[in-house]
Amino acid sequence: MTDQVARELHPLGERFEIERELGQGGSASVYLAQDKHLGRRVAVKVLGQNLSEFVGADRFAREIRLTARLVHPNIVPLFDSGEADGRLYYVMPFIEGDTLRARMDREGRLPVADVVRLVCDVAEALAYSHSQHVVHRDIKPENVFICNGHAMLADFGIARAQTSNDMALTQPGLVIGTTAYMSPEQALGEADLEGSSDLYSLGCMMFEMLTNEPPFRGPNSMSVVAQHLTAAPPELRIDDTERGPRLGAVIKQLLAKERADRPTSAAALLEMLRPLSHSTAESIRVVVEAPPSKVNPDSRKAAETGRSYWTRGVMGGPGSHAKLDMARTQFQRALQLDPRNAEALIGLADTIHVLGYRGFAPVEESVRRGRELRLEALAMDDENAAVRISIGFEMMYLDDDFEGAGTELKRGYELDNWSAYGPRSYGTWLKIADRIPEAIDIMRRATIISPDEAANFNALGDVLMTAGRYDEAVEPLRQALRLNPQYDMALERLEIACHRSGRNGDAAMARRSLLAHHGKTERATLLEDAIEKLGWAAARESDVRRELVELLEQATTEDPFVNSSSSRQLSDRIIVAYAELGEWKSAMDWVERGYYRRPGRLRRVLTDFLFDRRGLAIDPRYGPMLRNAGLESLL
C-alpha cells in the first residue's frame, strides 16, 4: 500500500486493517480490509469527497438502512456504513470471484446458456429487491459478481444514494459505465423510477453479454442518451437456432422505450427466460422398477401402503393423526404377514416417532420405542434403504450427528434407486450441507420418480428457495398444494416465495389461507383491512409483528428450545419472524441462545429454516460463533 493510500484511509484504521486497493473509479474506491468489528475480510467502498458531500451523511444513512434489509443469495449484502473524515463508506463481504465485466473483457461474447443462467440470477435478485420497493438504478456488468458460476448483484448502496442528476452526461470520449445502461426515464431525470427501469438496464447488459458491445454507442454521453430516448436498438443476431429468436424477442421487449411495453416485472421476465435454459430434469435417468424381494408380496404391499399414509401424515394439517394411525395399522399388518419385513418394522418405528413429536403420544416413550425398533430393523436387514434412511434422520434430528447422518442417508439413496424416498431424504441432507446444486438435481429426480407425492414438490420448492430462486420455487410449491391442499409447510413456503419474488397478490392469498388453516380469524381480518389501507408490504409486516408477539408470549410459558410438535422448535419460528422483519440482531440473540443450549443443532438452524443466514453476518457475534462451531464454511 502506498503512503498516499495509507494517509487517505487513516480515519478508517480504528476499525479496519486495510490490505490493498481492489479498484478505483471516478466517484469511489474499494479496499480489501480486515474488519475488526465483524472479525472477517470485507470490501470497504469509500465514496469520493465530492459525492460524499453531494449525498450527505443523513440521506446516505437512510438509504443504507433500507438497502441493508435486502438479504438474498444473489445480492451482495451490506454489512454496515459510516463516515470517516467527511467521506462516506459502506461495508460488504469480500467476494472471491470475477465481475461480469472482467469476464466479458477476458472472453468477449458469452455462450447463450451462460447468459440465460446469469441473467436469471440477476432477475431473481431484482424480483426480490423490487418486492421490497428498492430499485437498483445502476445495473451494469461492473456491479455483477460471478461466484461459483452464479451471479450476485452488488452496489445497492451507491445506486440508491445516487440519482440521475449525478450522472456525467456531458463527459467527452467513449461512454462507459452507467450511461450505456440508462433507461429513457432515468436519462430524463424522472424521479419516480420503477423496477421497469432496472429491466431496461438489464436488457442493455444482456445485449452486451451476447455481442460484446452495448446496444447504443457514441462519441460522448449525450449522444448515447439521445439514442436511449429515440433510437431503435440494433438488430441482434444470436448464434443459436433454437433459442436465438426467442431470446432476441425478450431483449427487444426489455429495451422498449415505454415502461408499459417492457415485461411487467422481474418475475414475468423469469417466466420468459426459464424455458430458454436447459432443464436439469431432461438428463435424469429414472429407474422405476422395484428390485426383487424375498419379502411376502402381501406384506410388502401393506408396508408400501403404510409408507404412503406416513408420508401424508407427517406433512401435518387436518387429518394427520388419522393418517398416522392408518400407517401404524398397515405396518403392523405387514409384520403379521411377514415378521422378516424390515421395511415394515422401520416404518412402524418412524410412525411411533412422529406420533410422539406431533403430540399424539408421549414424546419420550415414542422416541425410546422408535430407537428400539430401528435397532431391530438394522439387525434384520442392514442393507435396506428405508432402515438406513431412518437411522440417518435419527442421527440428524435427534443426535445432532450431521456427518454420521450424511453417511447413512447417502447409503440409503444408493440402495433406493426406484422410489422417491431415497433421493428426497438424501437431498434434504445435501441442502443442510450447503451443497445446493446437488440438492436441486436430486430433488428434481424425486418429483420425476413420484409425481403424485406432494412431499417431493415441497422439498424441491424448499431447496430452490434456499438457492434464492424464489420465483422458480412457486410452481413446485403450488403443485404440492394441488396434491395436498392441507399441506401447511408448502403453503408457508409459497407465501414467502411469492412475497420475495414480487407476486404480492399471490402472497396475500397464501397468507390468508395460512391464517385460516390455523384458525387465526382475527389476524386474517386485520390483514385484509391493512392490505386495503396500507398495501401488501406494510400489511404483511404488521401481521408478522403480531405473529412475533404471539410467539414471544408463548415462549414465556414453555421451553422454546425443545422439539414440541415437529423437528422445528418455537425458537426457530421466532428467529424466522425476526428475520422477516429485518431485525437481525434480535434474530441473532435467539440463534446464540439456541447454540448454547444445543450446539450441534446450529447447522440446521442456519441452513434448514425459512430465513437467509446471510442477514446475521451484520452481527459481530456471528463470525466467532461459526468458527467456534466448526462451521466457518458457512460464512
Image (cartoon, rainbow, N blue to C red):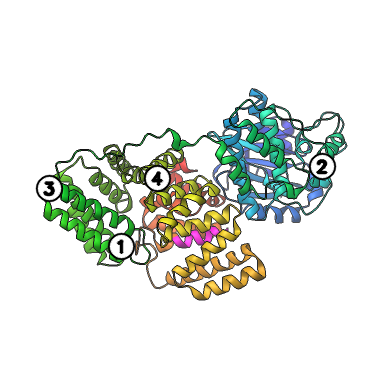
CB-based contact (under 8 Å), mark 4 and mark 2: no
Which residue is farthest bottom?
Answer: 522
Decide: few, some or many residues near mark 2? Use Cα within 10 Å; few <14, some 14-19, many ≥20: some
Contact (Cβ within 8 Å) of mark 4 with mark 1: no
Q: Earlier in the sequence, mark 1 or mark 3?
A: 3
Secondary structure beneath dot 4 equals helix
Observer-side mark, 2 or 3, equals: 3
Task: Residue 39 in the image: state x and y as whole percent.
Answer: 54, 44
Q: Which residues are magenta?
A: 573-582
Q: Circle 4 is placed at which residue position?
A: 447
The residue to which callout 2 is attached is 167
Q: Residue at 70% of width from left, 33% of height from top? A: 207
Which class describes the residues within 10 Å of circle 3: few (<14), some (14-19), or many (20+)? some
Q: Amino acid at mark 3?
A: Arg
Q: Main secondary structure of the magenta part?
A: helix
Residue 186 colored magenta?
Answer: no
Q: Considering only order in the chain, which callout, 3 or 2, is on the residue closer to the N terminus?
A: 2
Disc 2 and disc 3: Cα gap in Å?
77 Å
Q: Classify mark 1: helix, strand or loop.
A: helix
Mark 1 → mark 3, Cα distance in angstroms = 27 Å
Q: Nearer the viewer, residue 172 or 44?
A: 172
Asked if the residues shown at circle 2 and circle 3 are in contact, with their CB atoms under 8 angstroms apart, the answer is: no
User: Which x, y percent locates residue 430?
Assistant: 39, 42
For the image, the number of numbered tags is 4
Residue under label 3: 340
The residue to which callout 1 is attached is 357
Do the residues under discs 4 and 3 have CB atoms within 8 angstroms? no
- The amino acid type, in three-letter code, at marker 4 is Thr
> Does residue 145 appear to the left or right of 476 in the view shown?
right
Residue 81 shows in this picture: yes
Q: Is residue 576 left or right of residue 228?
A: left
